[in-house]
Amino acid sequence: MSETVEEQQVSDDDWAAAMGEQAAAEAAATASSVTQQAASAASALFQNFGDSGSKSGTMQDFDLILDIPVQMTVELGRTKISIRNLLQLAHGSVVELDGLAGEPMDVMVNGTLIAQGEVVVVNDKFGIRLTDIITPSERMRKLNR
């Protein structure tokens, strides 16, 4: 009778081991399926940029950013004043800036200097005529300082 109890324990252990192996195999298959689904979903959402070395692909990629708005600012000059003097400003007050008359104005895009120019009036509106454009290599040099 002790042999049947041992045989039954062995068969229960074998059964438990087989169930564990099956559960592990199913979990691995599920994980593989989820990974494949995520990869296919990602490829459906995102454009493949692996072929960007071709000229037409580069131009298409470049065209994607052409309509992004940027903030362009022309700076006449700056000054620092105390809050007391700021509160005393009234209609007709003059604030002296550090820029000199006739000096080129800074043209900035998103806070980065890209050019300098002179003020012009066109159809009763102010404009700026670019006189000096900062090259990308000069901008990089200024960033590295």
Image: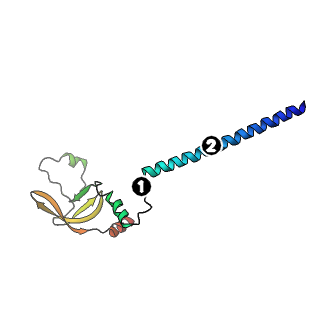
Of helix, strand and loop, which one carries label 2?
A: helix
**Residue shown at the point (66%, 43%) measured from the top left:** 24
State the image coordinates of residue 22 (x, y, percent, origin top left).
68, 41
**Residue shown at the point (59%, 43%) measured from the top left:** 30
How many marks do you count on the picture? 2
Q: Work out whether mark 1 precedes mark 2 in sequence or the reverse, and give the earlier one.
A: 2
Residue 47 bears which disc, if any?
A: 1
**Residue shown at the point (16%, 66%) measured from the top left:** 102
| Above or below 134: residue 81 | above
The kind of residue tagged 2 is Ala
| Res. 145 visible in picture | no
The kind of residue tagged 1 is Gln
**Residue shown at the point (62%, 43%) measured from the top left:** 27
90 or 130: nearer the viewer? 130
Q: Which residue is mark 2?
A: 27
State the image coordinates of residue 52 (x, y, percent, origin top left).
41, 63
State the image coordinates of residue 45 (x, y, percent, origin top left).
43, 49
The residue carrying pointer 1 sits among few (fewer than 14), some (14 to 19) or many (20 or more) residues within 10 Å by Cα, namely: few
Q: In this view, which residue lies farthest toward the left?
A: 124
